[in-house]
């Protein structure tokens, strides 16, 4: 006997919803879900960009130190 495929579910605010449930939502609720997902994506992109900018800043600051500018980082004597 073939197993019945389980319909994929989406977790929204801690509750599982099927595509059928989402299709039955009001246009306003569907719009809010789209905005919510868009904001989640923007936050993830902003976090990625922040990490990238922080890394780049450190690289340029290290380059400036190599040019003899600013204070040298503390180095332990071995």
Image (spheres, rainbow, N blue to C red):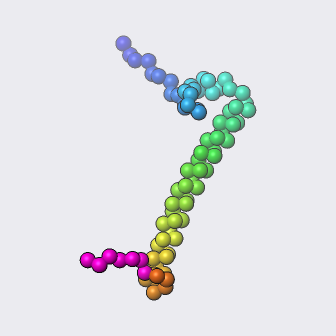
Residue 40, placed above or below residue 22: below
Q: Where is residue 64 in the image (x, y as percent from the top left)?
A: 48, 81
Question: Residue at coordinates 43% horizontally, 81% vertically from top-left?
Answer: 72
Question: Residue at coordinates 56% horizontally, 28% vertically from top-left?
Answer: 15
Q: Nearer the viewer, residue 69 or 77?
A: 77
Question: Residue at coordinates 50% horizontally, 24% vertically from top-left?
Answer: 7
> Which image quarter holds the C terminus?
bottom left
Residue 13, placed above or below residue 73: above
User: Which region is colored magenta?
Assistant: 72-78
Question: Residue at coordinates 45% horizontally, 87% vertically from top-left?
Answer: 68
Q: Where is residue 26 in the image (x, y as percent from the top left)?
A: 72, 27
> Which image quarter holds the N terminus?
top left
Residue 22, placed above or below residue 53: above
Examine the residues drawn in magenta and state their main secondary structure. loop
Q: Position of residue 60 (x, y in %)?
A: 49, 75
Q: Residue furthest right?
A: 28
Q: Nearer the viewer, residue 31 or 59?
A: 59
Q: Nearer the viewer, residue 18 or 3?
A: 18
- Residue 41 lies left or right of residue 64; in this view the side is right
Residue 70, placed above or below residue 37: below
Residue 75 falls inside the magenta stretch: yes
- Residue 24 lies left or right of residue 73; in this view the side is right
Q: Position of residue 71 (x, y in %)?
A: 46, 82
């Amino acid at each position: 006997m073939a197993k019945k495929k389980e319909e994929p579910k989406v977790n929204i605010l801690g509750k599982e919803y099927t595509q059928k449930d989402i299709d039955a939502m009001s246009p306003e609720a569907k719009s809010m879900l789209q905005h919510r997902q868009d904001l989640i994506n923007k936050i993830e992109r902003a976090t990625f960009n922040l990490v990238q900018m922080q890394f780049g800043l450190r690289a340029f600051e290290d380059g400036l130190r190599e040019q003899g500018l600013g204070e040298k980082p503390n180095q332990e004597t071995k």
